[in-house]
Structures are given as C-alpha cells and as structure tokens.
Amino acid sequence: MKSLFKKSLLFVLLLLLLGWFFLQPLTIYPVPQTAYFSFSTLTKAESFAPDDTTKVTCYQPLAKTATVINQDHLRILVWNLHKGFDQGWQQALTRYSQDRDLLLLQEVTSEQNLPKILSDLPQQLFASPVAYKDITAGVALLTKFVPQRYCSASVVEPWIRLPKSSISASYALANGQSLLVISAHLINFEWIPEAYQQQLQQLIQQVKAHQGPVILAGDFNAWNAERTTLIRDMAQQLGLSEVKFTPDVRERFNQYPLDHLFVRDMEVIEATTEQSKASDHNPLLVELSF
C-alpha cells in the first residue's frame, strides 16, 4: 500500500512539474490576438465591442475598401490543420486550397507562415488566443475578398485552461446584402458543456445580428449526443441548414463527427470530404451558390 502511495505521489508530482515546465513560456490572451494581413502586410483596424456580455471583439479595417463579391458561387475548404504536426501538410493544404474562394482553418500557428504559403488568397484573418514560446495558435479565415469588418472571440477550456477561438468576417455582396463567414474551434475537454455553451452563445450573437447569407463551419468537437444536440438546436434557432457530405469521412469520436458546416440562404452544389494523413482531421470541400 505504501509503495502504491509513493508511486501515485511521484506521478502527481511529475505531472505538476511537467505542467509548470510547459506553462512557463505560455501566454494566454483574454482577447485573442487578432491580425488582418492584406497581401502579407499587417493592416490596421479600429476595435469595438458590439456586446460585452459574450466577449466578442470586432474590428473595422482602416483605409481599406470592402470587395464586392460579384460571383454567384463560392468554393470552400474547412480544415483543422493540427498545428502542422503531420508530415505533408504544406503540400496537402496547397492542393486542397487550389481554386478555393474561402479557407476556414482551425489549429493554425504563426510558425506555419500561412501568408506566404497561401499568397493566392491575400486577405487573411487570424485569431490567436494563446502563444507558446511566442508562437501563436488559433483559427484563420483566408480569402481574396476585403472584409467590411471582422470579429474574434474565445473561451478558456475548463480543464487544461487553453482557450478555443473563432474568427468571423462580413463581406459585401452585389445585391446590397453581406455574407457572414465564421471559422470556429470549440471547447473540447469539458464533460458538462458550460464553457461550450458560452462559445455557442458567441456564435449565436453574431449570426442573430446579421441580415443575409451565413457560412458557419469548423471543428465543433461535437463528440457526444449532448453536444451534437446543442449545435443542431443552435442551427435551428438561427435558421441554418447543416451540410451533408458524400462521401463522409469526417474525423469522428464515438461515431460523432467533429467537424460541421452550416449555411443560411445558400444552396449546396457539392459537399465532399477526403481522407488525409496530413492532419488528424480530414478536409471538408464544399461548393455553395447564392
């Protein structure tokens, strides 16, 4: 019994030591570090908070005129990049992003240097709620269109204390409306989904405030029935339709797909997924029309 106690104590001390070691160079930002790169140049913006209750921060680009989307369809990639840990991710990302109008990415880092790799999509937004040894990590939204405005938000994981974030942007349409696009990465390590629902409220607030088409996608970490019900209830509340994939090889846990894409006032032309060893998630490839 004493031997077991000593081993357990040593194990706990080891975990505490490892936690202390890894957390030393870790920086958590209460408001995500939000960056807008236009043709690889960091662009200035004025920040404002539309609703302090859900801690969403929005930005108005300075000295930038929003691009009007004149095309009647959009080709989209949604993908969790696993921070570039997997071999071949650069080549895979280059291939999957070919001829895409919008990239909604999760688990991206500053070390990956996406502005250089994806220069064909020069309007790039990043929301990073955390940095490790000055390497930021978070979500991204890349396109060729200049946004009217963009917003970011995050919620801290209850157990591991690492935040999850979202980045959104609105884009002008030729008919006078605007398109809202949100790339989201939701809370993972939480059994009772309280923080998870806080993050859903951040998404709900933004979609409710928007008049016009919506694309909401990302890694929802919907790994059980309760979480799946929560995101589907959210979709119903907001008038969003869940996109179905053929074939459907999305990453799953307990048979529940983690990645989802929801739309409003848009038609699905094609929605497919593809097996990839370049990440621990498989990419979602979608074509939509207005």
Image (cartoon, rainbow, N blue to C red):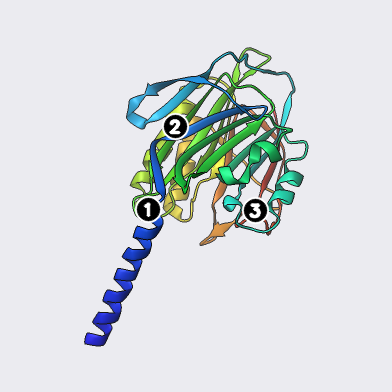
The furthest residue to the left? 2
Q: What is the quadrant of the C terminus in the image?
A: top right
Counting residues from the start of the chain, the first of labels 1 and 2 encountered is: 1
Where residue 194 appears, as percent x and y from the top left, is 33, 46
Give amino acid for label 3. Asn
Q: In the picture, residue 147 is in which quadrant?
A: top right
Residue situated in front as seen by the camera: 273 or 156: 156
Apparent side of residue 199 relative to residue 84 in the rendered image (left or right): left
Apparent side of residue 253 relative to residue 90 in the rendered image (left or right): left
Asked if one can make out residue 98 in the rendered structure from this viewpoint, the answer is yes
Counting residues from the start of the chain, the first of labels 3 and 2 encountered is: 2
**Disc 1 marks which residue?**
24
**Disc 2 marks which residue?**
204
Distance from disc 1 to disc 2, alpha carbons, whole Å, reads 35 Å
Considering the numbered disc 1 on the image, is that residue within a helix, a strand or a loop?
Answer: loop
**Labels 3 and 2 touching (C-beta < 8 A):** no
Where residue 3 appears, as percent x and y from the top left, is 26, 86
Distance from disc 1 to disc 3, alpha carbons, whole Å, reads 32 Å
Counting residues from the start of the chain, the first of labels 1 and 3 encountered is: 1
Asked if one can make out residue 1 in the rendered structure from this viewpoint, the answer is no
Give amino acid for label 2. Ile
**Labels 1 and 2 touching (C-beta < 8 A):** no
Considering the numbered disc 2 on the image, is that residue within a helix, a strand or a loop?
Answer: helix
**How many other residues sit within 10 Å of disc 2, few (<14), some (14-19) or many (≥20)?**
some
**Disc 3 marks which residue?**
282
Give amino acid for label 1. Gln
